Image: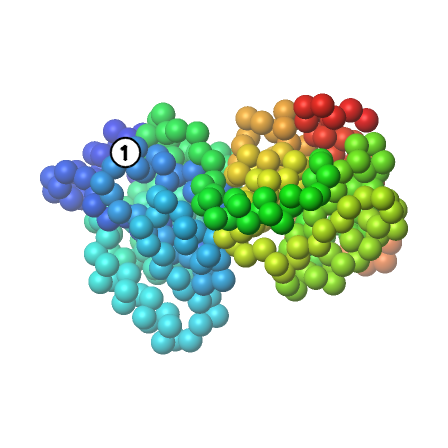
Amino acid sequence: MRGVASIGQLTELWNRKSKGTSSPAKACVIKPSALGDIAQTTVILPAIKQAFPDCSIKWVINQELHDLLVDHPMIDGLIPFERRGSWGSWLALYQRLYHEKFDLVLDLQGLLRTGLMAAAARGTLCLGMETSREMAWLANHAQFNATGWELPAYQRYCHVASAFHADWPPYEWPIPDEYADAANKLLADLPRPIVAVHPGAKWETKRWPAVKFAQVVADASNKFGGSAVLIGGKAERELTDSCANSIRRFAPKMAVCNLTGQTSLQLLPAILKRVDCVLTNDSGPLHLAAAVGTPVCGVFTCTSAEISGPSLAGEVGQRHRLIATQVSCAASYKKVCPFHGTAHLACFNELDVGRVSQGLDDILAGIAGLHP
């Protein structure tokens, strides 16, 4: 299958498929999930707008994540879908995609279901990724070069952006004023530095123990003072309550604010922008924090910091600190630990509090005026 690496190659393909139409007027981005992946993928938006300023962009997104992009100024409409919806809801989605008559379709998920979406959209030109599987590539006319599994996710999306415009502008997540104001009010009385803490993750193997997060935060408080803000979804409330209680036990003088379940997907980026640092597992908030320009101290157990790290690649080691386990099965990407007995979740024990504390200390020490 032909590869696309530059705007010249993309334009050539477009001219061949469109039979001379000047440029695509309607584009569809198919990237339904997950939160972190979507946060990284949005770097393509300014590049598309640079290449085709008059192109209207719509985005196919999981219904649960709809609000994440609802206010994005470069997106002209969202097409929600329910992953576990009825046959009727899937049929309605395919019919909508069919009748939209898109010129350009980008399947950046590359799974069977998104390949079917791309086929239904009938794009004049449909482009995919080299990571496409489950026969999703059958709907592609071509694929973006340098988008294979051997590359970090952020590089793959940057290569997609570069195919549209080599000099696409630096991208930072847009935050509407109303949410910036709401975040300021929520955090106004908290002493700095403010560390946002997210001890949750969907995979069992990503959830470094909450008590260890608490120990890291308490250690930082003893050196720098400041506050801790717990974040997460409603289902993570028990976990974050446990973490918050442990922080209060280890650092009684530290201000602790638990916002779990209180931050919508529209407000969360503003919260992450307002804090000084985010301490988290490899999860959506890690990538969203990087997208809004906030330093992250990331804990990596079953995933690779190099492959799955934050999208601001040039700043890793300068602003971000990514700490990974060193067990033999590290970066195995297994959602459930396959081992039993003392080997079960051995990565959690191997990744000690001291290493993560050093990473957080490095970030906080780099903030102007803060010294341990």
- Look at 66% across and 57% down and name the residue there: 260
Residue 176 lies in quadrant:
top left
| Nearer-the-camera pick, 94 or 371 | 371
- The answer to whether residue 131 is visible is no
- Look at 37% across and 29% down and name the residue there: 168
* Secondary structure at numbered mark 1: helix
- Look at 35% across and 26% down and name the residue there: 166
Q: Is residue 201 left or right of residue 179?
A: right
Residue behind mark 1: 51
| Nearer-the-camera pick, 356 or 198 | 198
In the rendered image, the quadrant that contains the C terminus is top right
**Position of residue 332 measured from the top left corner of the image (x, y, whole percent):** 66, 47
| Nearer-the-camera pick, 244 or 345 | 244
Q: Is residue 53 left or right of residue 351?
A: left
Dot 1 crowding, Cα within 10 Å, few <14, some 14–19, many 20+:
some
Name the residue type under label 1. Ala
Q: Is residue 11 left or right of residue 67?
A: left
**Position of residue 284 measured from the top left corner of the image (x, y, whole percent):** 58, 49
**Position of residue 4 measured from the top left corner of the image (x, y, whole percent):** 32, 35
In the rendered image, the quadrant that contains the N terminus is top left
Residue 202 lies in quadrant:
bottom right
| Nearer-the-camera pick, 328 or 202 | 202
Residue 174 lies in quadrant:
top left
Q: Residue furthest left?
A: 20
- Look at 65% across and 45% down and name the residue there: 187
- The answer to whether residue 61 is visible is yes
**Position of residue 227 measured from the top left corner of the image (x, y, whole percent):** 74, 42
| Image height of 57 relative to 163, above or below | below
